[in-house]
Structure formats: structure tokens, C-alpha cells
């Protein structure tokens, strides 16, 4: 499913126009990204997250630096530390996917 397919499905379920559905879907995504990249989330002791009960949790985690290899030369390199977004599915979401 693409973002366009998602917008179409939201429009069909809610009776909104595709334009309004697109704006709603984009607003949800933008809000999650804006919050997780905000200073408030970065300054929290245990990084705040966006938790949607019954669906899942979006959070940011720190990944430490590690050793890796350049696949072309085989040379060992250090992959730098970075911050990455993570999604953990909620229990009811996992249960519905498992069938």
C-alpha cells in the first residue's frame, strides 16, 4: 500500500474528499516527525515517544558506533553513532496481523 492508497482508503472510510484525507494523513505524519525531532523529545530523560494505544509506538533511539566493512575493498571501517526512528507495533496490531 502506498501513501496514495492510504489516502484513498481514508477518504472512502470517512466520506471526506481525497484532498481533505490527504491533508489529514499528512498532518498526522508531520506531527509525529515534528515531535520526535523536537527539542522537547531530545531533552527528555528517556526520550519521549508517540504512543497510539492499539496501534503502536514511534520512538527515537541512539545507535552506538560499530565496526563494519567496506563491501568493495574489504577494508574495516567505523560506522558512526547516530539517532534512528523506531516503530514498535502494539499488541492488538500484532494479534490482528498474526491472524
Image (spheres, rainbow, N blue to C red):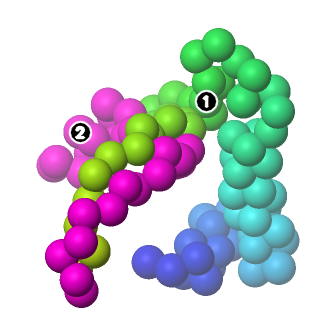
The part of the chain drawn in magenta is 72-99
- Residue 59 image point, x, y percent: 55, 36
Establish if 87 lies above or below 62. below
Relative horizontal placement of residue 77, taking residue 97 as reference (left or right): right
Q: Is any part of residue 79 visible from this angle?
A: yes
At 61% from the left edge and 30% from the top edge, which residue is drawn? 49
How many marks the image carries: the answer is 2
- Residue 8 image point, x, y percent: 62, 79
Residue, disc 2: 95
Q: Nearer the viewer, residue 75 or 19?
A: 75
At 61% from the left edge and 82% from the top edge, which residue is drawn? 4
Q: Which dot marks residue 49? A: 1
Q: Marks 2/1: CA distance?
A: 22 Å
At 47% from the left edge and 51% from the top edge, which residue is drawn? 80
- Residue 57 image point, x, y percent: 50, 35
At 63% from the left edge and 67% from the top edge, which residue is drawn? 10
Amino acid at each position: 500500500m502506498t501513501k496514495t492508497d492510504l489516502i484513498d482508503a481514508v477518504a472512502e472510510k470517512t466520506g471526506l474528499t481525497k484532498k481533505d484525507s490527504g491533508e489529514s494523513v499528512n498532518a498526522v505524519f508531520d506531527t509525529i516527525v515534528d515531535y520526535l525531532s523536537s527539542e522537547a523529545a531530545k531533552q527528555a530523560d528517556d526520550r519521549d515517544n508517540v504512543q497510539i494505544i492499539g496501534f503502536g509506538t514511534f520512538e527515537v533511539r541512539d545507535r552506538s558506533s560499530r565496526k563494519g566493512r567496506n563491501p568493495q575493498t574489504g577494508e574495516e571501517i567505523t560506522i558512526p553513532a547516530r539517532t534512528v526512528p523506531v516503530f514498535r507495533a502494539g499488541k492488538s496490531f500484532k494479534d490482528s496481523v498474526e491472524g
